[in-house]
Image (spheres, rainbow, N blue to C red):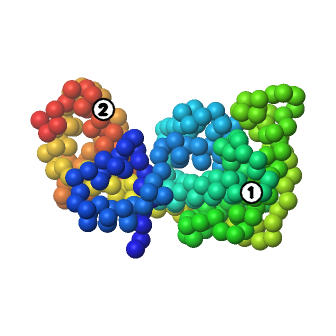
Amino acid sequence: MQTHWYYERARGQYLNDQAGMSAPQRNRFLLINPRRQVLTKTDLAKAACCFDLEADVACKGAEKAFIAFAERITKEWEDEANRAKYNDDWFRSAIARIILFRAAEAIVSKAPWYEGGYRSQIVAYSCMRLAALAQELGAGLNYLKIWNQQGAGAVLEEQILLIGEQMTEILRFPPRAGQNIGEWAKQQACRKTAIDTRVKIVSDFEDWVGRGGEQRLQERDARRNRRVQDGLDVLKQVLEHDAAYWISAREFCRAKNILTPEEERSLVPACQIPHRVPTDRQAASLMRLVEKALDAGWSEGT
């Protein structure tokens, strides 16, 4: 049975979704959404910070990691050119980071060199150095390959084990004698030391590194597909309204003197629906016009 990765947007959502289910329904829900594949927003944020080479931020705690993650996503989302990258492949890559992060937790816990304590810091820095190593060799880790096999695999597990031992040494011996390890892990100096440290590369590791040209092509195709889908979604919203709706919007905006030349041109085909259909670009302009008209006091369709 194919299973899902369950993203818990709000605390307790996973359990709330099971409320009121019969025993057979709950069993099926748990088969499709196993507990081991549940992740929270802080899980996502910590893993993202580590693989974005910000282990020091991840070590500051779940809340601060999430704030940093949310601020970065919000800033990128405000730029329409960047929105297209938030597609299915982005989600798969995000889950691949979670897979590696959890694999690192298990590896560190069982490692012969692990003496207990500061596991979260060792894991954070091990994931960061793994990502940095892949960037040194190519275009970064091939997250889609990790997603496809739904596991780290023997090669990456061996690489994490080697890196983890070196990161443990860096964390346990800060430059200032007596310095608290937890505080040292939160510093940019610790991050720089970790990234600058040379690590041994295991055999076949490069098989898990994306080649620049291929990855850029893949990302470009994903962005193009997302733009196409976004265009279809916006056009669908426009076509949900008839010509009378758009004529009403045009008359209101003309009266308020808030129409731009581009919006006037976009309204020409909209006011002739279904005989004419706006382009994707015109549809986007029309939906922005609706928001502007509503803000100015227009009652839709009047």
Q: In this view, does 229 lie above or below 255?
A: below
Residue at 70% x, 69% y is 154
Q: Give the numbered dot on residue 292.
A: 2
Mark nearer the N terminus (2 vs 1): 1
* Secondary structure type for disc 2: helix
Residue at 57% from the left image edge and 70% from the top image edge: 149
Q: Is residue 218 left or right of residue 108?
A: left
Q: Is residue 37 left or right of residue 290?
A: right
- Position of 219 relative to 281 (above/below): below
Q: Determine the CA span between mark 2 and mark 1.
A: 59 Å
Q: Can the viewer see residue 102?
A: yes
Among the 4 quarters of the image, the one containing residue 294 = top left
Observer-side mark, 2 or 1, equals 1
- When asked about the image quadrant of residue 181, the answer is top right
| Residue 70 picture location, percent across and down | 52, 37
Name the residue beneath numbered marker 1. 111
Pointer 1: residues within 10 angstroms few (<14), some, or many (20+)? few
Which amino acid type is shown beneath numbered disc 1?
Answer: Ala
- Residue 284, image x and y in percent? 36, 47
Left of 249 or right of it: where is 48?
A: right
Three-letter code for the amino acid on which mark 2 is drawn: Lys
